[in-house]
Image (cartoon, rainbow, N blue to C red):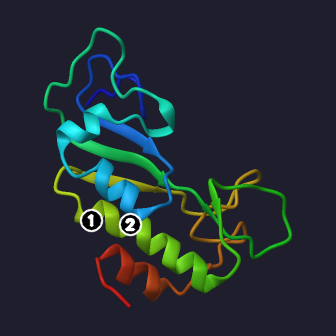
Amino acid sequence: MVISNDGWNHTVSDLLTIHDYEGKKETLLRRYQSRERIINDMPANRTLLAHGFTYENQPVIVSEFGGISFKMEEMEGWGYTSMKSPEEYALAYEAVVSAMLESEAVQGFVYTQLCDVEQETNGLLTYGREPKIPLETIRRINEGGRG
């Protein structure tokens, strides 16, 4: 498998991969409602295909999304959106994951990221590898459960 440029400006590629850190479920649902809509939208104001290249019906993978910051430890860092409590964080995570699960045009997705790193606090786990919300909650959300 070859990915020409993960996230945007694809040339000849086996997958159409997209980086999209939008935090609003409604926007994600609209953006990923069809392949035509996906191709014509511009997450982060970037084109998915490089000039002169066309979409060739490759599988659509949102290879980076989420980026929701919730700081549980005293550390510097950032995310694309920020939450102040575990409850807010769980709701924000559920919003972005459920949008991906509800899309019939997206064949796969990768949440950014598993754990906090030196400069980013947008992991599901802290830098010390402690869950920010219960693992059962993460599993329920990933499996499409509500509530």
Label 1 with label 2: CB-CB less than 8 Å: yes
* Quadrant of residue 144 within the rendered picture: bottom left
User: Is 77 left, or right, of 51 in this rendering?
Assistant: right
Residue 147 pos. (x, y %): 38, 91
SS label for mark 1: helix
Could you tell me which quadrant the N terminus lies in?
top left
Q: Is 67 placed above or below 85 here? A: above
User: Which residue type carries mark 2?
Assistant: Val
Residue 4 pos. (x, y %): 36, 22
User: Which residue type carries mark 1?
Assistant: Leu
Q: Is 87 placed above or below 92 here? A: below
User: Is 80 left, or right, of 141 in this rendering?
Assistant: right
Q: Which residue is mark 2?
A: 97
Query: Quick one: 144 or 73, which is closer to the camera?
Result: 144
Q: Name the residue rendered at 29%, 32% in the picture.
A: 40
Residue at the far left in the pictured view: 57
* Quadrant of residue 37 within the rendered picture: top left
Q: Name the residue rendered at 77%, 56% in the picture.
A: 77
Q: Residues within 10 Å of mark 1 (few under 14, many from 20)?
A: some
SS label for mark 2: helix
Q: Name the residue rendered at 24%, 65% in the picture.
A: 102
* Quadrant of residue 53 within the rendered picture: top left
User: Is 2 left, or right, of 56 in this rendering?
Assistant: right
Q: Name the residue rendered at 35%, 11% in the picture.
A: 51
Q: Residues within 10 Å of mark 2 (few under 14, many from 20)?
A: many
Q: Which residue is mark 1?
A: 101
